[in-house]
Image: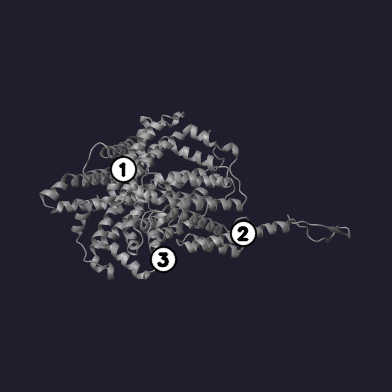
Amino acid sequence: MSVKQPNVDIDQNNEEVQESVSIGRALKGKQQKIVAFTGILLSGFAVYVNSFINMQEIYRNVLFLALLFVLAFLLYPATKKGANNRFTTVDIILTIASIAGSVYILLFYTTIHVDRMSQAVTMDYIFAGITVVLLLEAARRTLGLFIPLLTSLAIIYAVFGPYFPGIFGHAGFSFERLLYRVYMTTEGIYGLTLSIASTYIVIFILFGAFLSVSGASKLFNDLAIAIAGQRRGGPAQVAVLSSALTGSLNGSAVANVATTGAFTIPLMKQIGLKPRYAAAVEATASTGGMMMPPIMGAAAFIMAGFLGVSYSVIVLAAIIPTFLYFVALVLAIDLEAKKHGLKGMSKDSIPQVWQVMKERGVLLLPIIIVISTLLMGYTPLFAGFAGIISVIIASWLTKDKETRVTFAKIGTAFIDGAKSTIQVGIACASIGIIIAVVTMSGLGSAIAYNVLSISSGMLWVALLLVMITCIVLSMGLPSTALYIVVAVTAAPALVEAGVNPIAAHFFVFWFGALSNITPPVALASYTAAGIARADAMKTSWTSVRLALPGFIIPFMIAYNPTMVMQPESGSVQVVAVAITIITSVLGVFALAVALTNYFSTDLVVLERLLFFASSLLLVSSGLLTNALGVFIMAVTLTLHILRVKKKKRCNREPVSPRRVNNGKGKQQEKRSFES
């Protein structure tokens, strides 16, 4: 049984939003075939070098970036008003130049480091300069101005270090030395971040593309509707579930909003939710998808590489915080629906869970296989390949012929996967320059020193400063790019302040992700507002209100590493983890009640203040504060329920008789009852 689509017109504004997040030009004919061939070549290359041969890192990264350059310049126009259905002469010139820059280092890398003993010549610097400029232009086309601007500032900082004031000043580096570092070594453009993109990230993007062509996204939507559709505010709960399931794979809150939101937002409006609120629910849920294990938009792999821990450690660390985030969101939605008396979807439009599972449930098998292999200690590459193969096999085990992954669909998955890799890959290459500058200049240590100096040893001040830094630096970036930026610049400050390293990296990643709904550059909120025809800024502030527990969770992580399975000493204690989960759930419940200003009825001011106070006490790590929080919440909840019962009882009691005029000059008694 398939889900009936809502009888709601998706407006032109929605179409514009979807177009804005689509990948590149709408090409036709030979030009479309050129891009398709390049996409298949990129995906095929990724599969080949990560499975059948052992290619040296520098050569793999150079070839990978060369193919990304071709796709970036051919698919993305130079300006928004540029040619949207064809290549231009400038695009072709830039493509050829980028290939030349890649081929040069490919041919002369050994010559530079072996024959010339790492001594560069003029021609080396020329091609290095060309490649850096082309990378900045590719980043501008695919990612907007922020990343190339940040990269350019890093270059300026490296060269003109002596002119910067105080602790931020350094000896400075010649332009030649910088070019050598970022182009001719594996510590810049072709460094760690691009290595992760050319291995783990591209394979898992391909895994997501194969899931998509098999129809798994329809399974996610149908399953979410079957589970939550009939609940009060059901479509909003559906938005949370479907966005959580898909967000972990695609890693982009904006893309998540555009895909799942096109279906869930009209449904939410249909049951009576205000457009602004419906858009905020979708934006907040899609942002949470970026933090959702096991993939976390591929940020999990980068985090594991930065911290030098196994992937399973990162996945386990993400479980409790993400669980709390979505619990808080579901509670807030449920209370809002209860407050306004909203119903769920009609029963005839909702499939049965068993029916959905019967039709396409086998498509969940690849996700189970991926998670299982990762947690069993296999490498992410092995898990990714196992996932892709299991998608193909599972697609042929369903009764629905539409799910079957044919050769044509494999080609489509290769092309879609390659297109989805462009932004992440270009971002990783660009940020390689920033990492090189930070390492050379000691900028990370300078930021850490200043944060510690300003905070004067007060951890909460340091956390606030880092929070603001992360939100500003992450505006408009996908999960992998934003994590790399904040991990390099902000995380060292928290580690220096004494925060557990894993907790510190989760703190900065979390706030980087929340930048998608935080004004003024709240791209996920703005995209959702476009679909819902709502005010963009008001939608953004509503998203912040819904996600407020998400703004508190990172502070909980910093003060209580047990949240990320990292106790301050010894091994993880089951009792400690259980207490943390229980008190945290109670805390986000109290916060949701306070923010919604409703439980059984509207709260009075004192009740709202007490619920808020108890939430803060419950999310702290001390047993005494937790006990006090439970006591305050229990007392407040009891008083609230008693007040509601008393009010209902009074409403049922008759009011004293009063005289009314019957219109003929006579008085008569009439009993009135309050409804």
Amino acid type at circle 2 is Thr
Amino acid type at circle 3 is Trp
Q: State the colouring used for the structure image.
A: one colour
Estimate the spatial distance between the alpha carbons at disc 3 and disc 1, rounded to whole Å: 37 Å
Q: Position of residue 40 (x, y in %)?
A: 31, 36
Kindly report which numbered mark, 3 or 2, lies closer to the viewer in this rendering. 2
Nearest the camera: 555 or 48?
A: 555
Q: Earlier in the sequence, mark 3 or mark 1?
A: 1
Q: Residue furthest left?
A: 115
Q: Is residue 133 left or right of residue 596?
A: left
Q: Position of residue 559 (x, y in %)?
A: 41, 61
Amino acid type at circle 1 is Thr
Residue 113 visible at all: yes
Estimate the spatial distance between the alpha carbons at disc 2 and disc 1, rounded to whole Å: 51 Å
Kindly report which numbered mark, 2 or 1, lies closer to the viewer in this rendering. 2
Disc 2 packing (10 Å; few <14; some 14–19; many ≥20) = few
Please give the residue where the numbered disc 1 appears in the rendered image. Answer: 379
Mark on residue 460?
3
Please give the residue where the numbered disc 2 appears in the rendered image. Answer: 638
Identified at 33% across, 54% down, the residue is: 484
Mark on residue 304?
none
